[in-house]
Image: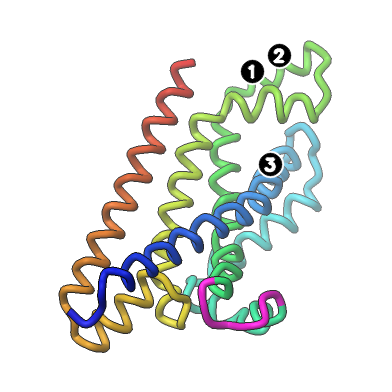
C-alpha cells in the first residue's frame, strides 16, 4: 500500500470539511431561493411571475451543467474568491454553485407538498405572508425538508469526490492520485468503503430524524 493511515484520515477530514462548508453556504443560498420559487409562483402568497421566472431560469441553467464542467468553467470566479483553483477551499466554491440551486429545488418540492388548506387557515387567522412562511409552511414541510437536505448532503459527498479529479483534495483526490494513477487497488477499495459508509450513515440519520419530526 503506497499511502499510510494518516494520509487516508487527512483525506477524510478534507472531504468532511468540503461537504460541511459547502452544505452551509448552499443552504444559505438555496433556502431563500426555494421559498421564493414557491411564494412568487402563480396563485401563491406573493405572486410575482417576473421574479419567479428569473429565479427559475437561473436555477435551471446551473442545474443543467454537469458538476465537473461547472467546476472548470468557474475557475476564474474560484480564484477571485479564494485566491486559488486547487485544494479543499477552492473546491467549496463550485460545490456551492452546484448544490445551491439543487437545494432550492428540493425545498421548492417540499414546500409544494404542504396542504393548501394550511395556508388558507393561516390567512383566515390574519397571518402575514412572513408568518405563514415561517410559522406554518416551513414547520409543516420540516420532515420532507430534512429528507431533502439529506439527499443534498449525499450529493455533495459524491461531488466532493469528483472534485478530486481536478485537484480538489479529499477522498476523491486520494483515490485518483494513489488508487488509479499508481494502481493501488487497496487505496481504491478503502476510499470506496469510506464513501459507502458515509452515505449509508447520512441516509440513515436523515430517515430517523425525518420520522421523529413526522410523529410530533
Name the foreground residue: 13 vs 114: 13
Q: Nearer the viewer, mark 3 or mark 1?
A: 3
| Disc assigned to residue 35 | 3
Separation of disc 1 and disc 2 at Cα?
6 Å
Q: Main secondary structure of the magenta part?
A: loop
Q: Tell whether 3 sits left or right of 186.
A: right
**Residue depicted at x 78% and y 48%:** 49
**Residue depicted at x 32% and y 84%:** 177
The colour scheme of the drawn protein is: rainbow
Name the foreground residue: 215 vs 109: 215
Separation of disc 3 and disc 1 at Cα?
18 Å
Residue 91 in picture, x, y percent from top left: 53, 72
Q: Nearer the viewer, mark 3 or mark 2?
A: 3
Residue 99 in picture, x, y percent from top left: 55, 59
Name the foreground residue: 73 vs 7: 7
Whether tag 3 and tag 2 are in contact, CB under 8 A, the answer is: no
Residue 26: in magenta span: no
Q: Is residue 91 above or below residue 214?
A: below
Q: For mark 2, what is the residue?
A: 121
Q: For mark 1, what is the residue?
A: 117
**Residue depicted at x 36% and y 72%:** 172
Q: Tell whether 18 sits left or right of 165.
A: right
Neighbour class for label 1 at 10 Å: few (<14), some, many (≥20)?
few
Q: SS class of the residue under badge 1?
A: helix
Quarter of the picture containing the N terminus is bottom left
Neighbour class for label 3 at 10 Å: few (<14), some, many (≥20)?
many
- Decide which of tag 3 and tag 1 comes sooner along the chain: 3
Whether tag 1 and tag 2 are in contact, CB under 8 A, the answer is: yes
Q: Is residue 174 above or below residue 26?
A: below
Separation of disc 3 and disc 2 at Cα?
19 Å
Specify start and end residues of the magenta stretch as a single range: 81-88
Amino acid at each position: 500500500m503506497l499511502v499510510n493511515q494518516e494520509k487516508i484520515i487527512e483525506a477524510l477530514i478534507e472531504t468532511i470539511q468540503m461537504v460541511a462548508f459547502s452544505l452551509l453556504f448552499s443552504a444559505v443560498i438555496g433556502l431563500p431561493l426555494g421559498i421564493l420559487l414557491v411564494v412568487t409562483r402563480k396563485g401563491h402568497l406573493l405572486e410575482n411571475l417576473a421574479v419567479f421566472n428569473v429565479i427559475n431560469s437561473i436555477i435551471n441553467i446551473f442545474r443543467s451543467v454537469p458538476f465537473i464542467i461547472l467546476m472548470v468553467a468557474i475557475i476564474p470566479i474560484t480564484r477571485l474568491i479564494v485566491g486559488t483553483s486547487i485544494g479543499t477551499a477552492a473546491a467549496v466554491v463550485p460545490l456551492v454553485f452546484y448544490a445551491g440551486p439543487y437545494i432550492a429545488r428540493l425545498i421548492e418540492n417540499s414546500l409544494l407538498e404542504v396542504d393548501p388548506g394550511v395556508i388558507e387557515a393561516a390567512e383566515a387567522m390574519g397571518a402575514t405572508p412572513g408568518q405563514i412562511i415561517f410559522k406554518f409552511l416551513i414547520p409543516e414541510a420540516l420532515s420532507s425538508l430534512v429528507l431533502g437536505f439529506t439527499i443534498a448532503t449525499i450529493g455533495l459527498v459524491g461531488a466532493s469526490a469528483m472534485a478530486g479529479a481536478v485537484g480538489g483534495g479529499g477522498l476523491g483526490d486520494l483515490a485518483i492520485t494513489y488508487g488509479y494513477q499508481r494502481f493501488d487497488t487497496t487505496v481504491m477499495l478503502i476510499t470506496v468503503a469510506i464513501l459507502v459508509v458515509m452515505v449509508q450513515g447520512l441516509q440513515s440519520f436523515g430517515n430517523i430524524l425525518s420520522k421523529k419530526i413526522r410523529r410530533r
